[in-house]
Amino acid sequence: MAGLSKFMSLSPELYDYLVAHGNNRDPLLQELSRETAKLGPISVMEIASEQGTFMGILTAAIGARSAVEVGTFTGYSSLCVARALPSNGELLCCDVNQEWTAIAKRYWEKAGVAHKITLKIGPALETLRALPERNSFDIAFIDADKTNYRDYYEEILKRLRQNGLILLDNVLWSGAVLDQNDQSEDTKAIRAINDFVSHDDRVEAVMLPIADGLTIARKR
Ligand code: CA
């Protein structure tokens, strides 16, 4: 049946080939990745380079001026998005961790995009709910605690312009979404948001096999 499939599984070599054939060889991003790697196993939370490039392309292609990110970590995704915004563009970064975002801040300075970024340290739901409910965001990236994905999605959707995009990260959860023996809170939350978004008539959504799975939802 292989000839009938419309997908293919990547080998490590094919994945390397894929990464090497995007032009995502930015020295500053590579420096950030090296610094993030020094944090140890937690560094796996940094997004993949091709995902960063993809997010930058989406941001620029829709002419985004206002962006929001829930879960900044050491700043890789925020750098990609902020660079793709115009010079008067704005990115709101929500995170709870001072140590990680201190690294992000240094790289925003180095990249000359710090003036576009507002960092809010604290629970992102509080940050989002304090914002006026007008359709101000063009693009959003949700990549934080999985059990709150649904709430982040709702708060952002209320504040997203028509044809704006919400990106949800880790939606395949290393394949655990299919493992019925895995009933952890995180896994159940990912399954729930995936089921919800795929039936949400307010958006058009597609799930892509980038990195750990990325859903793109366009507000109708
Ligand atoms: Ca992630």
Image (cartoon, helix red, strand yellow):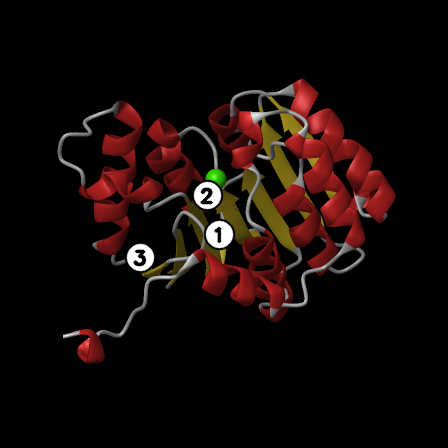
Secondary structure category for the residue under label 1: strand
Q: In terms of depth relative to the viewer, which is nearer, 59 or 169?
A: 169
Label 1: which residue?
160
Q: Which of marks 1 and 3 is nearer the N terminus?
A: 1
Label 3: which residue?
202
Amino acid type at circle 2 is Ile
Secondary structure category for the residue under label 3: loop
Q: Can residue 208 be seen from the camera position used here?
A: yes
**Image location of residue 141, percent across then percent down:** 51, 46
**Image location of residue 9, percent across then percent down:** 33, 62
Secondary structure category for the residue under label 2: helix
- Alpha-carbon span between mark 3 and mark 2: 13 Å
Q: Residue 31's quadrant in the figure?
A: top right
Q: How crowded is mark 1: few (under 14 residues within 10 Å), some or many (20 or more)?
A: many
Which quadrant, please, contains the N terminus?
Answer: bottom left
Q: Which of marks 3 and 2 is nearer the N terminus?
A: 2
Q: Residue 64's quadrant in the figure?
A: bottom right
CB within 8 Å, label 2 to label 1: yes
**Residue 29 in the figure: left or right of residue 160:** right
**Residue at position x 57%, y 62% from top?**
19
Which residue is most to the bottom?
3
- Alpha-carbon span between mark 2 and mark 1: 6 Å
**Image location of residue 77, percent across then percent down:** 62, 46
Label 2: which residue?
156
Amino acid type at circle 3 is Arg
Q: In terms of depth relative to the viewer, which is nearer, 133 or 199?
A: 199
Q: In terms of depth relative to the viewer, which is nearer, 99 or 196?
A: 99
Amino acid type at circle 1 is Leu
- Alpha-carbon span between mark 1 and mark 3: 11 Å
